[in-house]
Image (spheres, rainbow, N blue to C red):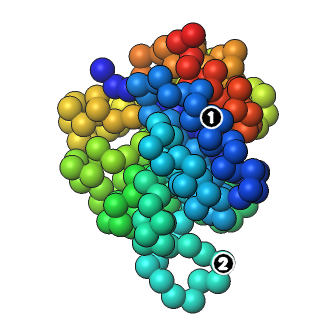
Amino acid sequence: MRKKVIAGNWKMNKTPSETAAFITELSDKVKQTKDIVICAVPFVCIPAALKASKRTKIKIAAQNMHYEDKGAFTGEVSAKMLVDLGVQYVIIGHSERRQYYNETDATVNRKVLKAIKAGLKPIICVGESLEQRETGVTADFVRYQVGYALNGVSSEDMKNIVIAYEPIWAIGTGKTATNEQANEVCRTIRQALNEKYGRKVANATYIQYGGSVNVKNAAELFSMSDIDGGLVGGASLKSDDFCKIVNYKG
Ligand code: PEP
């Protein structure tokens, strides 16, 4: 049985001084969970988040990283820097980064390989646009994205990978994919992993759904056969809501 991985993506919200109080409050509310709880916080909030989450259930993720080790890349942060701080997870290829910062499947793959090499666990985001869904290419497109992102990733490395299926049309829009739509694409991803790595790896890999997950829909989405938790944006910013999502079993 796979655990659930429930990750909050704060995006560009909360200051370092708001971070400690939030994580402390949240950690108290989620201490009974057997699942994996992650907060993906802005770079500048990472030290405060790590300090407040010490000896709690909460793990800390970055929301991005660069694929080079170091050098003249003004404004960027390397995998090594994150590991040095004590970060365990990193979101790679979020659709907002693909849309606003020219992230491509090729840069996503480079970042994934670098993250693994550095000892970080990537949460790789994939997902189709509304137009792609309406033209019926969702399965092919998502398979392509997953295959590209995992190019050069070994079976052994797969134990450190989380894949987040996030249909772009459902992110921050209040439109959630139906349980069946979300599960179908997560199952397609698992099939693609099965073809590439075999059943054992496919069955062990965490595949999240993300896109307007909230207190009302989390339990149903997370009960689907191929959905192993969620990547949660807006609803992860209120500790009451996020803790209800983490404690979705009621
Ligand atoms: C996200 O940021 O990955 C996300 C899914 O956002 P929201 O839950 O707000 O749709």
Local packing at callout 1 (Cα closer than 10 Å; few below 14, some 14-19, many 20+) is many
Q: Residue furthest right?
A: 173
Q: Is the CB atom of the residue marked by disc 1 within 8 angstroms of ligand 1's nearest atom?
A: no
Mark linked to residue 26 = 1
Q: Can you give x and y, in whole percent of width and height, for residue 27 in the image?
A: 57, 35
**Label 1: which secondary element:** helix
Mark linked to residue 75 = 2
Q: Can you give x and y, in whole percent of width and height, for residue 181 in the image?
A: 57, 21
Local packing at callout 2 (Cα closer than 10 Å; few below 14, some 14-19, many 20+) is few
Measuring 51% from the left and 88% from the top, which residue is drawn there? 71
Residue 29: in sight, yes or no? yes
Q: Can you give x and y, in whole percent of width and height, for residue 48 in the image?
A: 62, 57
Measuring 36% from the left and 31% from the top, which residue is drawn there? 190
The answer to which quarter of the image holds residue 234 is top right
Mark linked to residue 189 = none
Query: Alpha carbon of mark 2 to alpha carbon of mark 1: how far?
Result: 30 Å
Q: Can you give x and y, in whole percent of width and height, for residue 87 in the image?
A: 47, 58
| Between discs 2 and 1, the one toward the N terminus | 1
Measuring 24% from the left and 37% from the top, which residue is drawn there? 201
